[in-house]
Image (spheres, rainbow, N blue to C red):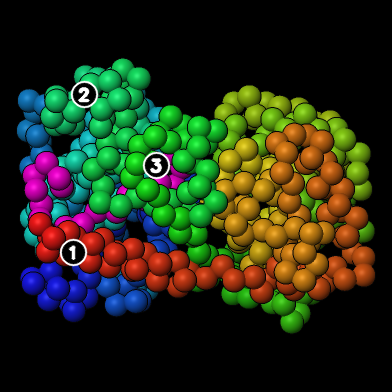
Amino acid sequence: MDQIKRKQKPLKVLFGASEVVPFSKTGGLADVSGALPLALSELGMEVKVITPLYRKKTDFEKTKPHSKVKIEMGNKKISVDIRQANFPGTGVTCLLVDYPEYFGRDELYSYPDDAERFTLFSKVIFAHLVSEGNYDVFHGNDWQTCPVFYYIKAENLSNCYSLLTIHNLQYQGVFPKEIMEIAGFDPSLFYPAGPVEFYGDVSFMKAGIFFADKVNTVSEGYAGEIRTPEYGEGLEGVLNEKGVVGILNGVDTTIWNPAADTQITATYNYHDLSGKKKNKKALQEHFKLRVTDAVPLIGMISRLADQKGFDILLESFDEIMSMPLQIVLLGTGQQQYHEAFADMQKKYKNKFGLFLGFNNSLAHQIEAGSDFFLMPSRFEPCGLNQMYSLRYGTVPVVRSTGGLADTIIDIDCNSIAGNGFSFSDYSGDALVDAIKRAVSRYGKKGWEDIVVRTMTSDVSLEAQARKYLGLYHCMIINSVVDNAVV
Ligand code: ADP
């Protein structure tokens, strides 16, 4: 009865993520975490976001004290400050977990004590859920928040339903067994193929999948793929048992909108594409490429990781570069790719522009100034850049997998609804073939129609938020029904 009554009030949601725009960002998780909570709040929910305060990324002076919590980490008791800041221009609060010893470092991840760092983050989230006492939903994202799902069940935090969103199953938070004690997992959970055990280690992601009320991922395509051994990263069994819903990410058009983007040379819209040409010129100048509209410019913005298809790109790079085109690449990540692309840049000075690093405004300029956007991913949970590209009239060329398959329809297969070019085989040859098909269309009859069609593709954030609202209600209603049956 109480649950039914509470449904009439706005749902109170705590959204936990290890990176959130505008406070920190390494990839798409941050974009989603900075946009979806605001869209949920516009649908009438009371949403708060919680994330670490990375003092090297977030201006401490722009945050205010919120509360203090006491946390046990093994036999250590520590006091942690929670600070707060509003998302700019909104009344939505972001809670920032301030523990400089763990989060005051140069980077967000990849430290030897990541297990402890995000265990602490998860414990602070749980302490906040308990102290507030009236959250209806905890919505956690990726392995960094996964212990929270266990704490909610173990401590029987009643009436708080939990949803885990998997943004990338490849990153699971797998640590040696010793973390069991600090994480506070019951030792009885660790046995071969048990809820937290993963080939002799502890997997935070597996624990999250096991203990969350519901699990979803960021596209329907990826939701199907991760239930198979090819993409399931060893967790396909538990995912099949649990069930996974796919909800496609949307685009935050307050940030990614060519008609109002303050980070590009010239704004434009699909009625008047002249600004796009100015952006192309500026981009060519920036990278010291020949300034010309006679050949297409292909943009790439990406973490330089195996997942993103750089092996097949490098394998076919010489052949691609022999075509009438230019490429610009903005990325940072694995050293082997830094080196390989730096070599390619020396080889193709006039045709290939490279920036190795993270640069948000350059990312906007590449979206605006390129004719095509290339994502040859081996797998792609959702992918945001192909959707930003659609908004910017930058025709995507993608490998058809996960969210890329859900959002990009090949123009040669469907001349009416097509909004990009795609290929299926994960091979250099298939990639070259797709680029050839794309380049052959550039500047020809019908080219502007293609650009306009991409710009009018539906990539709405509101549609995404409504689906999450539905999922929250579904968790609550299922539980009311289950309790009634009991
Ligand atoms: P993933 O989350 O797997 O990295 P997505 O396509 O979902 O991939 O999201 C990547 C996000 O990170 C996009 O907003 C993209 O523009 C941004 N991004 C990636 N690499 C860089 C970079 N080197 N500089 C600036 N932005 C980047």
Task: Point out the frontmost of discs 1 and 2.
Answer: 1
Nearest to N terminus: mark 1 or mark 2: 2
Label number found at residue 190:
2
Closest to the observer, 202 or 315: 202
Residue 386 versus residue 126 in the image, above or below: below
User: At 87% across and 48% down in the image, what residue appears?
Assistant: 436
Give the magenta part as a residue range. 152-169
Instruction: Report helix, strand or loop for mark 3.
Output: helix
Q: Pinpoint residue 191: horizontal percent, then vertical percent.
A: 23, 21
User: At 62% across and 46% down in the image, what residue appears?
Assistant: 401
Ligand 1 closer than 8 Å to label 1 CB: no
Q: Are marks 3 and 1 in contact (CB under 8 Å)?
A: no
Is 38 left, or right, of 46 in this rendering? right
Q: Are marks 1 and 2 in contact (CB under 8 Å)?
A: no
Nearest to N terminus: mark 3 or mark 1: 3
Amino acid type, mark 2: Phe
User: At 66% across and 64% down in the image, what residue appears?
Assistant: 390
Amino acid type, mark 3: Asn
**Image quadrant where residue 413 sits:** bottom right
Q: Which residue is mark 1?
A: 481
Q: Does the rendering let one see residue 317?
A: no
Label number found at residue 240:
3
